[in-house]
Amino acid sequence: MLFALLLMAAAPDWVPARWNSSDPKSLDLLAQTPINCILLESTDWSESIAKAAAGRGIATLGVVHPGAGAVDLSRKAIALKMTGIALDGDFDPKIREALADSKIPVIELPSRAKMRLDDRSAPVIGTNQGLWPGVQVEENGATKAAPSGAPWIDTNTGFLRFVRAYTSSPVWIANKPPPGMVIPVQRYVQAIGDAAIAGARWVIALDDDFNRRLLAGEPRAAADWKKIGANLKFYESHREWRAYRPHSDLALVEDTGSGALLSGGVLDMIAVKHTPVKPVPNPKLSAESMKDAKLAVDVDPSSLTPAQKEVLRDFTRGGGTLLSGPPNWKFPTPQNSEITLGKDDFTKLDEIWKEVNGLTGRRNLGARLFNVSSMLSNLLESPDGKQMILHLVNYSDYPVESITAHVLGTFQHARLYTPESEPRDLQVYKVEEGTGIDIEKINIVATLVLE
Amino acid sequence: MTRRELLAALATAPLLRAKEAPTAPVSIARSRTYDDDLGGTLSTMFDQLGGLGRLVKNKTVTIKVNLTGSPGLRFEGKPLGLTHYTHPKMAAAMAYLLERSGARRVRFVESCWASGGPMEEYLLDSGWNVRMLFGAAKAVEFENTNALGNGKQYVRLKVPGGGTIYPAFDLNHAYHDTDVFMSMAKLKNHATCGVTLSMKNCFGITPASIYGDDAGEQEPNENPTKGRGEVCHFGKRQPAKSALPEIDPNSSRQPGYRMPRIVADLAATRPIDIALIDGIETVTGGEGPWIRGLKHVKPGVIIAGTNAVTTDAVATAVMGYDPRADHGTAPFVDCDNTLRLAEAHGIGTTDLKNIDIRGLSIQEATFRF
């Protein structure tokens, strides 16, 4: 029992990767990365790799897929002394009861619609559904535009930020790269950053070609792997950032029934416009969760309980501005493999965008960013409120130069952290809204720390 | 064909008034990168043109830059100044040079795409270091001319000779309240007009508040969010009624007919005192990333002059085209020739034989688009 508790206690620090090798020597590749938890398909299970991994302090999770033999396969993983099991897909809930006696961590990675956000006993809240992050390009090679006019970025950040606001458990997104594509290393770094800026972890998953070349010791694959490791290290060396909370004057009240589990929804749309926003899941709606907000968007008022409606009434009585959506604003919950908005929903989103844009305008709701059309950001503040961080991810294939941030409030120090160089102090200057900072260049990911 | 269309067609006939149209020298310089000494290069070019001081000393100089399309739309993710926008270093070098030549005030203007907000913010979104630009000269200002901006009312400028599409244009005050007007353009093709140089750049002086697709029916929309396609390119609707409507609503609705005329009329209405065309790095095949088949290129040239038509004629030749080419011949494949329409206005000659070219020769500078 104690051992099981110890394992569970370690789960928040697990840095996961899908690992496609049964060779214990392959674990040498993990030495240069912070990865300390590998997800193994049953074809790669063996006592030797489980033992070798344990010897290096690496947790092993046996991946089990839905099917008739799932329970037996799970018991086989336990017998092989693997650290735990990853249920990859949508299972009959009875499997949890069947494995209850095992006392080992069971990580559920279902579809988004089946996520059990309220399960406080789960070592990790995760899903195996996600978009492959990046700037969306249309068939003719042109960049697809969002309702805001900015390029549309495929991202999981809106969904992940909602989940992070819902649960204090570690959050994993375990989607795989799209098959049959040559994926340059920067796309992996973007996937890492896409999850990390929302306080979640992407379960590293290499495409087949990269995986083969890496295991064969090809130098270029090794160099790319090193880069992936450096970017993981960048976020893992600042784990405290995961505890920071969203900072914004704008609160978005939404729930699973109003599109929060979808990608490309309201939260993504606001984020693409680089408007900081604080997601407030309906069950978490309280005077406390609304205390710093000046504006609020309630996507689906009909889903609120009378007590929750009263919270919003108090918010407006206190001087807050509330934009309530009409009944037709409701978005569907994700269905099976569909995790993005349907065609009709985009029309709805465009209407919402106009309303939200009319509400926020050019107001600074925490930070305004310039020259960041290919980037997404997340503004967070430390629990003591003394530090603010601005996560940035560039989803284009080129570095972005000459970025400007206007942050509300007066800050004396600004320091830029990137994976490829030592932290460096940036000049802060006064602007009408508060503090201005210029960033010369960002390759893929960076974090600005303000004090 | 209406009488006005007939007159306009005659104006582009081969025996145009080329010899009668005024001429002015044009300077061509080599500059391979934006890290070159742009200030020094521009200084030499303006010396070749007779000196900048005589044009700008103690004067307000308004510079219309070229920031076409949303700053969010990048070509291959490259900085905008390397593809289809005016490069910020060119703007900074020019501001510095104007200051050194005695200009009293330098005002950068643009009708920022789909925005009525401050130009400074649009520039920041375009990757410009606005603080550095403020430091390039003592009195630097910015104004978004897509709406009323800092003015109290729009100014109405009548088209000399009555105009071909609109009889007059209602513009932001900045185009009137200035001593010297400069067009800082990019050397590019244009999907509708064949080329976009110093004159076509100034199509952007029309405010979308009045000529935009979401302009008010009666009054200007001071928060425009769209381009001018329906009003100007296609003539599907009239501008806000606060401005004068089209002369002939039954005239051709073809963009290749309308746009060259609007551009030539604007060049006659708000004359360009200094034309500066940045061809250090640019794109071929169109004016921006929304055009298919675009290609990033490095012609490595700057072209400047004090007559927009002679400057654009030389620039068109540097691109490998005949500046007097007819409709149907590249680059004017689907449009009338804006340069010759402007020549017909008596602004300047398109005849290269009558243009004094200083610095590099056209042959030396030619980069075939």
Image (cartoon, coloured by chain):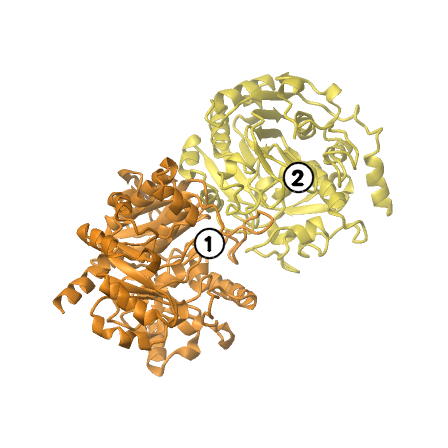
Chain colours: A orange, B yellow
Answer above or below: position of A46 versus B302: below
Quadrant in the rendering for residue B186 = top right
Q: Is residue B279 visible?
A: yes
Answer above or below: position of A266 versus B16: below
Q: Identify the residue shown where x is 71% and y is 55%.
A: B238
Q: Identify the residue shown where x is 76% and y is 33%.
A: B340
Q: Identify the residue shown where x is 75% and y is 51%.
A: B246
Instruction: Name the kind of residue labelled 1 in the image.
Output: Pro
Q: Do marks 1 and 2 both belong to one polypeptide chain?
A: no
Residue situated furthest bottom in the rendering? A306
Identify the residue position indicated by label 2 in the image. Answer: B190
For discs 1 and 2, the disc positioned in front in the rendered view: 1
Q: Secondary structure at mark 1?
A: loop
Q: Dividing the image into 4 quarters, which one contains the N terminus of chain A?
A: bottom left
Answer above or below: position of B132 versus B49: below
Number of numbered labels in the structure image: 2
Q: Position of residue A19 (x, y in %)?
A: 33, 52
Q: Is residue A225 left or right of residue B268?
A: left
- The subunit letter for the residue under badge 1 reads A
**What mark, if any, has residue A407 been given in the picture?**
none
Q: Is residue B173 left or right of residue A397?
A: right
- The subunit letter for the residue under badge 2 reads B
**What mark, if any, has residue A178 been given in the picture?**
1
Q: Position of residue B325 (x, y in %)?
A: 77, 31
Residue placed most toward the observer, A436 or A22: A22
Q: Is residue A319 visible?
A: no
Q: Position of residue A3 (x, y in %)?
A: 14, 65
Q: How many angstroms separate mark 1 from mark 2 (CA)?
A: 37 Å
Instruction: Name the kind of residue labelled 2 in the image.
Output: His
